[in-house]
Image (cartoon, rainbow, N blue to C red):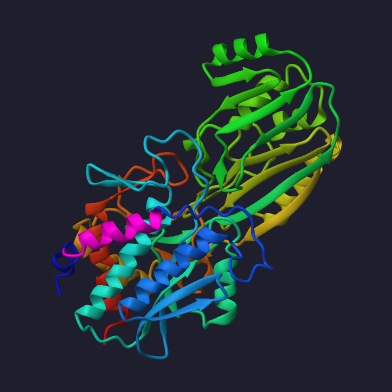
């Protein structure tokens, strides 16, 4: 079957369906477990309903799992092939050329938050299954497009799904890059907490999510340091401003798995404040956290041949004049000594009156490169991309693949594509997504065809 020729006929449908989904601002504002209808908010529920409605209209079996997740199913058999996408997106921080939820189509690209992470690729996988169905391909497995609602924060959607439904025997998440990701680093979210008053700092705020490099930090100061702050901005060529007692500095958003791609606004603010404040927490940040994306200052840095080096993202600061929270996000390789790392964090904070607290930990995920699943997916990619040189690899990002025993991240970004997940001006290339549809259809046929 020449899936590429068939996929090209679905381009208009891909654009229409993806645009509609991208225009729903599915940013999690608050999780409410008591709200049984909309636990992750109105917009995320709207996106889930939209996808399940399309699946039902196209003749698939669909199921809503407590409004936490859902699936669209085709095929028969005892075994399940799971294709795991998510409908939530991170906040649309930074400066955009187009409104982040406009889904603007220009020069063959669709610009929107979630274009590649993960709505466009999820639609590509859905249309691949639709092509399989419409071409009458018989399957010996159930194929389920699994739609999670909470991937960008705590993965509660997929956790609830797996509590209620059988875990797929094999699977892939179209939520990363081609040719294929066979390993994902562990993810450790943690806080440093303290209580302290300072004669200079009334408050500091920056960051919304552990998995994003913060692009803006705002400090409210009790003394007039406007002259000094503006001189500081000029000296280092930083962008910021002063409005009364409100001091703002801007950095650049990036994914926490690649903190070097961003500019951490909290570190920039601390670079200024450390010269004017005697607060212990500012001293602590300067000594152990600021301007360090690999955990060297805390003694955490390590390296694995397959998973590469540890990263440490300084994601959140929330200080109200008394109570302090610093939120951080580590991506660690499989040889990292987790317990020793926790001990180092605890010991570092003690002299400053700062307490370490673990928020969440997800262990590294790994599937052998020799596994049949990987060989089948790789052959599908190579058939339609013509690329037989780019090796499979591991990443610092975390996808739903890590929630299954045997699953990997598979596309939909191609080698050489600009990486803008969690950054302003995120976009997808329509022609590339059509190629991804063909690759996913080939993969489904190889893995589940009779």
Q: Position of residue 271 (x, y in %)?
A: 66, 23
Residue at 36% across, 57% down: 20
Residue at 42% across, 86% down: 79
* Displayed quadrant of residue 213: top right
* Displayed quadrant of residue 215: top right
326 over 202 or under it: above or below: below
Residue at 26% across, 64% down: 437
Q: Can residue 392 be seen from the camera position used here?
A: no
374 over 203 or under it: above or below: below
- Out of 242 and 393, give the one closest to the viewer: 242
Q: Position of residue 373 (x, y in %)?
A: 37, 73
146 over 229 or under it: above or below: below
Is 276 placed left or right of 4 in the picture?
A: right
140 over 52 or under it: above or below: below
Write the start and end of the magenta stretch as one range. 9-22
Q: How many marks?
A: 0
Q: Position of residue 122 (x, y in %)?
A: 37, 63
Is 151 placed left or right of 2 in the picture?
A: right
**SS assignment for the magenta stretch, majority:** helix
- Out of 203 and 81, give the one closest to the viewer: 203
The quarter of the image holding the C terminus is bottom left
Q: Can residue 21 be seen from the camera position used here?
A: yes
- Out of 276 and 25, give the one closest to the viewer: 25
- Out of 120 and 293, give the one closest to the viewer: 120
15 within the magenta span: yes
Q: Position of residue 305 (x, y in %)?
A: 48, 52
87 within the magenta span: no
């Amino acid at each position: 079957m020449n899936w590429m020729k068939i996929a090209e006929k679905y381009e208009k449908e891909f654009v229409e369906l993806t645009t509609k989904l991208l225009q729903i601002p599915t940013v999690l504002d608050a999780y409410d477990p008591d709200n049984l209808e909309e636990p992750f908010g109105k917009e995320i529920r709207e996106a889930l309903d939209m996808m399940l409605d399309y699946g039902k209209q196209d003749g698939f079996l669909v199921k809503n799992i407590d409004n936490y997740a859902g699936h669209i199913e085709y095929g028969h058999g005892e075994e399940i092939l799971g294709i795991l996408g998510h409908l939530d997106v991170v906040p649309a921080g930074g400066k955009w050329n187009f409104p982040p939820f406009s889904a603007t189509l220009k020069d063959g690209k669709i610009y929107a938050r979630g274009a590649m992470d993960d709505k466009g690729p999820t639609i590509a996988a859905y249309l691949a299954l639709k092509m399989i169905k419409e071409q009458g391909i018989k399957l010996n497995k159930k194929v389920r497009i699994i739609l999670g609602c909470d991937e960008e924060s705590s993965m509660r959607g997929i956790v609830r799904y797996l509590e209620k439904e059988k875990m797929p025997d094999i699977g892939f998440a179209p939520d990363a890059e081609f040719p294929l990701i066979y390993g994902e680093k562990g993810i450790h979210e943690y806080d440093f907490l303290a209580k302290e008053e300072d004669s200079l700092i009334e408050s500091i705020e920056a960051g919304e999510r552990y998995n994003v490099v913060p692009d803006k930090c705002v400090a409210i100061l009790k003394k007039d340091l406007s002259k000094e702050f503006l001189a500081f901005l000029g000296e280092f060529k930083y962008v910021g401003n002063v409005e009364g007692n409100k001091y703002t500095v801007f950095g650049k958003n990036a994914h926490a798995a690649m903190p070097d791609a961003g500019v951490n606004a909290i570190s920039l603010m601390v670079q200024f404040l450390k010269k004017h404040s005697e607060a212990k927490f500012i001293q602590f940040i300067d000594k152990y956290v600021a301007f360090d994306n690999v955990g060297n200052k805390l003694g955490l840095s390590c390296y694995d041949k397959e998973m590469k080096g540890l990263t440490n993202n300084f994601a959140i600061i929330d200080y109200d004049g008394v109570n302090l929270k610093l939120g951080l996000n580590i991506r660690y390789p499989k040889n990292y000594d987790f317990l020793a790392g926790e001990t180092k964090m605890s010991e570092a904070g003690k002299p400053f009156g700062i307490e370490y607290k673990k928020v969440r930990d997800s262990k590294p995920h790994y599937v052998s490169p020799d596994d049949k699943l990987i060989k089948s997916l790789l052959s599908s990619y190579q058939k339609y991309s013509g690329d037989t040189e780019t090796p499979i690899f591991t990443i610092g990002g975390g996808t739903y693949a890590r929630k299954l025993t045997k699953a990997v991240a598979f596309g939909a970004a191609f080698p050489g594509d600009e990486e803008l997940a969690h950054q302003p001006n995120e976009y997808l290339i329509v022609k590339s997504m059509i190629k991804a549809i063909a690759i996913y259809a080939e993969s489904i046929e190889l893995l589940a065809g009779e």
